Structures are given as structure tokens and as C-alpha cells.
């Protein structure tokens, strides 16, 4: 059967502390709540696409530890195909200690562990083993060479490639731009990739142009509460505003957006990029209103029927 969305990416266990404000260097502070959740940008995006109803495959590596085994269980509970998630003895499952303050802002430490052992050949073999797929999603939380190899083989096979260049890397290999159909950075990632300041819609337009010049076919810069900016080589850039909501925890909101976008690209290809982005932004606005990463992602039943 046809796979809608393939994700080559990371799995982390998020260890989230809720605090009044983020600690300063050398400081000890009290938190008000602690929770453990499934995270990692790749996993989050894959789970979001699956929650919307996409048929998804995750290609990843976890450690032979509790977090790793639980991660695989979680994917299964979310109906994600786990045939290409391997377990390594050489490293621990990725972990991400996260602090979330009263404004819903976060700071994250990523200890990649097993994620960095996912190789280009693992990705190539897995994608080669999938009969047909519509969309490939990559991020930069595994080795960049692995993501790039995945995008190249996907391109060969006619799969739409989407790159969420997160966490940001300044000296990204130029091939990344050539092999992605859609690049979807946030403001800070767009700044690092272009060397330009991106703090508002006008600046995002200029940065998006620069990303198009680097070879991407379509650019979506997410702008948090300001929505997103879409740009393609053959039309004027479009600003898609987000609806105003009170954020309690924005962790993983970008992944929620990208996962929902992948769902629309694969399952509703006739929608315009603007419509997809409006809908994905609505889904992400729900996720910021409750705590946690994947725990805050809505499922199809929780969403208005107009979104489908
Ligand atoms: O984008 C949010 C994610 O970043 C978290 O789930 C954490 O694991 C880090 O990878
Ligand atoms: Na959230």
C-alpha cells in the first residue's frame, strides 16, 4: 500500500520541567511540575502526521533501553509503521531535558545518543524498501549526511521532499537546498541559513527570496505568533497570519505544524500551499494551548471537520 509520509529523523525522550523563569548559569531554582514525554523533532512530526490520519513510516535509531523500547511502543500506539526503527547497543536513546517558563517559552538541551548512529545507508535501505511514498520529511537532529542521503534517494523516486532545518546549522551543505522541494525553517533557522535578520514579515520575505536563490522550490518561514510566510519562485510572497491564542507551552509547536503540513501535502495535494499552511497553523495553535510536545497534539477527532 502507498505510504503518505516517511520521516527520517530523531527520537528523544523529553524530560520537561515547568519553572517560573529559566535558570541563570550557576543558579538552582525550583520547578513546579515535571513530566516525561515522547519527543524528538522527527518523531513529533511523524506522530502529528499520523494523528491526522496519514499512513506514516518512521526511520530512526534508538538505544536498547527503557526510553527506546517505550518510544517504539508509542509509535505503534499512534499507528506509525516501525519496521525501520532499529535498536543499537552502542548508544542510549536520545534525551532532551527541557525547561518551560510561565510564558510558555522553552530552553532545550538535546543529548542525541542513538540518533547520531542512524546512517545514510540505513536511510537509503529503508526508503529503498518502501514501495511508494508521497512525502519525505527530514530535520537536522540526525547526522546531516543521513538527512541529505534520504532526500537524494527520495528525489530519485519522485517523493516530495520537505526539510525542516532544525536545529539550525549555519554551514548547511548546499545540496540540501537543491534536493528539497519545500524548506520550512523558523525565524532563527532562516537567519542562520541566510545571514539576514528575520524578526518580522518584511524581513522574512527577503530571507525567503535568498532561500529560493539557493535552489529551494518553495519556502515556508514559520513566524510563531505571526503565522508564516510562503514564497515560491513564480509568485509574490504570501503572509499567512496565525490566530491569536494564549500559549502555555510552545515546545514542539513547529513540529506540529510541519507534521500537519506533510499530511496535507500527501493526502490533500489539491489544496494550495496557502490553504495547507492556514490549516497546519490552526493545528499548531491548538498544540501551544496545552502542556507537553506530542501530548499536546490534537488527533483528527479533536479537530474541526473543515480541516479535512
Ligand atoms: O522541537 C521540539 C523537540 O526538540 C522536543 O521534542 C525535543 O526532543 C527536541 O528534539
Ligand atoms: Na504544547
Image (cartoon, rainbow, N blue to C red):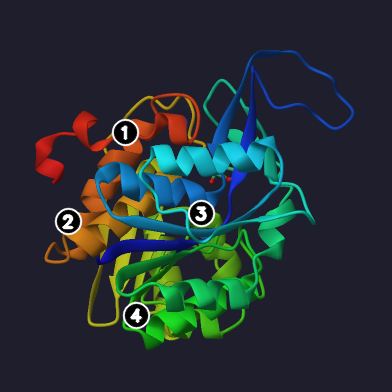
Which mark identifies residue 42? 3
Mark in front: 2 vs 1: 1
Residue 210 appearing in the image: no
Q: Secondary structure at mark 1?
A: loop
The reply to whether callout 3 and callout 4 are in contact (CB within 8 Å) is: no
Q: Is residue 224 above or below residue 190?
A: above
Give the CA separation, mark 2 to mark 1. Answer: 19 Å
Mark in front: 3 vs 2: 3
Give the CA separation, mark 3 to mark 1. Answer: 17 Å
In depth, the one of 300 and 185 nearer the eye is 300
Callout 1: 10 Å neighbours few (<14), some, many (20+)?
some
Q: Which residue is mark 1?
A: 298
Give the CA separation, mark 3 to mark 4. Answer: 22 Å
In depth, the one of 134 and 85 nearer the eye is 85
Q: Is mark 4 within 8 Å of ligand 1?
A: no
Q: Is residue 10 above or below residue 300?
A: below
Q: Is residue 35 above or below residue 251?
A: above
Number of callouts in the render? 4
Q: Residue at x 53, y 50 (%)?
A: 41
On the image, the x and y values in percent for residue 199 come to 49, 53
Earlier along the polypeptide chain: callout 3 or callout 1?
3
Q: Which residue is mark 4?
A: 217
The reply to whether callout 3 and callout 2 are in contact (CB within 8 Å) is: no
User: Residue lying farthest right?
Assistant: 26
Q: Residue at x 32, y 59 (%)?
A: 262
Which mark identifies residue 275? 2
Earlier along the polypeptide chain: callout 3 or callout 4?
3
Report the side of 158 relative to 255 (left or right).
left
Earlier along the polypeptide chain: callout 2 or callout 1?
2
Earlier along the polypeptide chain: callout 3 or callout 2?
3
Q: Residue at x 57, y 84 (%)?
A: 174
On the image, the x and y values in percent for residue 271 come to 13, 62
Amino acid at each position: 500500500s502507498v505510504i503518505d509520509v516517511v520521516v527520517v529523523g530523531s527520537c528523544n525522550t523529553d524530560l520537561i520541567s515547568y519553572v517560573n523563569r529559566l535558570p541563570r548559569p550557576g543558579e538552582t531554582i525550583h520547578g513546579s511540575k515535571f513530566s516525561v514525554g515522547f519527543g524528538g523533532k522527527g518523531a513529533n512530526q511523524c506522530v502529528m502526521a499520523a494523528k491526522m490520519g496519514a499512513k506514516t513510516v518512521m526511520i530512526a535509531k534508538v538505544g536498547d533501553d527503557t526510553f527506546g523500547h517505550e518510544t517504539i511502543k508509542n509509535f505503534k500506539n499512534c499507528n506509525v509503521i516501525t519496521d525501520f526503527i532499529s535498536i543499537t547497543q552502542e548508544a542510549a536513546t536520545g534525551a532532551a531535558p527541557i525547561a518551560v517558563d510561565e510564558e510558555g517559552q522553552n530552553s532545550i538541551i538535546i543529548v542525541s545518543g542513538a540518533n547520531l548512529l542512524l546512517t545514510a545507508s540505513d536511510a537509503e535501505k529503508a526508503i529503498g524498501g518502501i514501495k511508494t511514498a508521497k512525502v519525505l520529511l527530514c530535520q537536522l537532529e540526525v547526522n546531516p549526511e543521513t538527512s541529505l542521503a534520504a532526500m537524494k534517494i527520495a528525489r530519485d523516486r519522485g517523493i516530495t521532499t520537505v526539510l525542516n532545518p532544525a536545529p539550525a546549522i549555519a554551514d548547511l551543505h548546499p545540496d540540501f537546498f537543491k534536493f528539497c522541494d519545500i524548506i520550512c525553517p523558523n525565524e532563527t533557522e532562516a537567519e542562520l541559513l541566510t545571514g539576514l535578520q528575520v524578526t518580522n514579515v518584511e524581513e522574512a520575505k527577503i530571507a525567503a527570496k535568498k532561500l529560493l536563490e539557493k535552489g529551494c522550490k518553495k519556502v515556508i518561514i514559520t513566524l510563531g505568533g505571526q503565522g508564516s510566510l510562503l514564497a515560491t519562485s513564480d509568485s509574490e510572497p504570501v503572509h499567512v497570519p496565525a490566530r491569536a491564542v494564549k500559549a502555555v507551552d510552545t515546545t514542539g509547536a513547529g513540529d506540529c505544524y510541519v507534521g500537519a503540513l506533510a499530511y496535507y501535502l500527501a493526502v490533500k495535494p489539491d489544496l494550495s500551499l496557502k490553504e495547507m499552511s492556514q490549516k497546519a497553523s490552526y493545528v499548531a495553535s491548538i498544540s501551544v494551548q496545552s502542556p507537553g510536545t506530542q501530548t499536546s497534539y490534537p488527533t483528527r477527532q479533536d479537530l474541526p471537520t473543515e480541516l479535512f
